[in-house]
Amino acid sequence: MAATWSLADLYHAPADTTADLERARTEARSFAERFRGQVALHIRDAILAYEKLGDLTGRVGSYAGLSFSADSASPEIGKFYGDVQAKLSEIGTETLFFELELAQIPDDVLEAALAKDPELARYKPWLDTVRAFRPHQLAEDMERLLYEKELTAASAWSRFFDETIASLRYVVRDEMLTGPQALNLLQSPEAKLRADAAASLSATFATNVRSFAFIMNTLAKDKEIDDRWRHYPEATSLRHLSNQVEPEVVEALRTSVVSAYPQLSHRYYKLKARWLGIEKLNDWDRNAPLPKASDREISWDEARTTVLNAYGRFAPDMAIIAQRFFDRSWIDAEPRPGKSGGAFSHGTVPSVHPYILMNYLGKPRDVMTLAHELGHGVHQTLAARQGLLLAQTPLTLAETASVFGEMLTFRSLLESAPTARDRAILLAGKVEDMLNTVVRQIAFYEFELRFHAKRRLGELTPEEIGEIWLAVQRESLGPAFDFSPGYANWWCYIPHFVRTPFYVYAYAFGDCLVNSLYALYREAHPDFVTKYFAMLEAGGTKRHKELLAPFGLDASEPAFWNRGLSMIAGFIDDLERDSALLEGKS
């Protein structure tokens, strides 16, 4: 039986949040009375008070958000979540002035304050991040209006998406399934069952596609308006700025991956079609298991042991931190109706601890997902020592520990594989995971680029969105695939397009970064483990160039991305050499 979490370290019940919400409201008003118009004179005191208030509101917000993720189909929980969001928004309007005033402090005034106050100087990385948005700030009354309307704008549509996707059901062979259960059938060894599951998913998506298209169109237009008023030159500009990464670095990543499609995904899926004994793959065959691969269900206990042992071999301290998530019920892995699909590790606030949500179904990929989310959890635990404002890691680096955790687990399994065939099956599974992380996520990013560019010219019909989706899928997956007409709507269920536009390239960034890091680890780079832990503990106190410098890596160089991609290509080379081991009938 997979684990379920206890949120008691946050609150025991929704009613328990009432007192803290009222206290936060009072403290926010006191904060505004004390510091409005005076921030430049009391920078350190204001930051410390702001951070303390943020821990309190973050605790309440985390509890409401996690409760909603665990059961977004419940009207009571949905109301609780909505009410908390509204109250936190009201509290946030009281302190909205603070970061605006911080950004407007003259450079020389701030530099002088930092020079004579070591405690304040510790916050310089966060101050730099806040002040980076100065060219895009609006007048305070406009900022306040947009902030308050967020609940009925992007946040509302995101919630509507979550509730809608969680409520959908899919009938496969007379059985009513949730989204995660139906998607899991795409990994069935039975080709007809995969086809039936895909047909049900496509039919349900088609029935609801107008709603999802309206959500996408509305959010994209909302973003375009906001970007225009704030003078962001591109639809991606806000994401790059938030990620503290230069646009040219992301473009170098995108270009490198797209250029590598033929050597990576196109080549691999041609091999997979041969292994499955078919001329071309259907879209529902992308994650099909290989012939004669074990379909044994991996128990939750076995998955836990596998990941913890892999972590422990790398660094005992990493396994000790990860063990707490199991011992103290910080993981919710049980699949059930109404629960959010996918997986995440939510860092909550430094005064508590992270929580992990996933849907464990006993597949090898679920073990990798557990390793991935525990990597996030370890990272968030270590970074929490920096405090609320400095613990937050840019998305481009937030995926480092998670993907590294996957790699540790994979390498451990690979080394213990009993036969050459078992090793080849594991290697093929890892290549598929890497293609899903790098090629598929860059394809998602490409889809978003094209969708947002076209949306600026007018609203897109579901059919037009589907055309963009299919074009990108054909380019990224290659000529080894045939795509069914219903696959045109499969953009519908990807939550990142709704919740966090242009997030997805962070996965590819993290995977390529980890490939380079892991190569150094295998080469016995001096003090690697010590440097790695220091990187995780840094949280948001350093930028990617500073964090990678001790390893001799630089993401601004094309060689960095090519090195990461070459690891995937090397794995495919091995599979081509051992291809005969995997051939069989589907």
Image: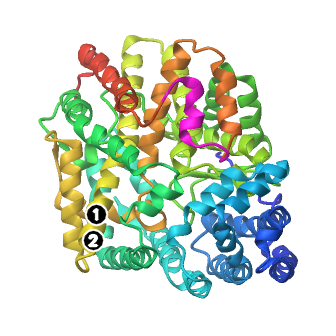
Count all numbered tags in the image, as a single digit: 2
| Relative height, residue 479 to residue 414 (above, below) | below
Give 290 or 162, whichever is nearer the viewer.
Answer: 162
Amino acid type of the residue that numbered disc 1 sits on in the rendered structure: Ser
Label 2 secondary element: helix
From the top left corner, tell me how far across and down residue 360 is, in percent: 56, 46
Horizontally, residue 547 falls left or right of residue 508, namely right
Q: Is residue 94 left or right of residue 207?
A: right
Quadrant in which residue 224 is drawn: bottom left
Any magenta on residue 550? yes
> What residue sits 58% from the left and 71% below the top?
72
Magenta-tinted stretch: 540-553
Name the residue: 30% across, 48% down.
194
Q: Please, what is the three-letter code of the amino acid marked with disc 2?
A: Ala
- Mark pair 2, 1: CA separation: 6 Å
Residue 287 in the image: x percent, y percent? 33, 41
Residue 88 covered by magenta stretch: no
The disc placed on residue 402 is none
Vertical placement of 275 versus 471: above or below?
A: above
Name the element at disc 1.
helix
| For residue 1, side relative to residue 154 (left or right) | right
Return the residue at label 2.
Answer: 206
Q: Is residue 487 above or below residue 414?
A: below
Give the residue pinned by disc 1: 202
Residue 355 appearing in the image = no
Residue 457, position in %: x, y? 22, 77
Query: Looking at the rendering, in which quadrant would you find the N terminus?
Result: top right
Q: In this rendered view, identify the residue nearer to me: 281 or 61.
A: 61
Q: Are marks 2 and 1 in contact (CB under 8 Å)?
A: yes
Specify whether residue 503 is in view: yes
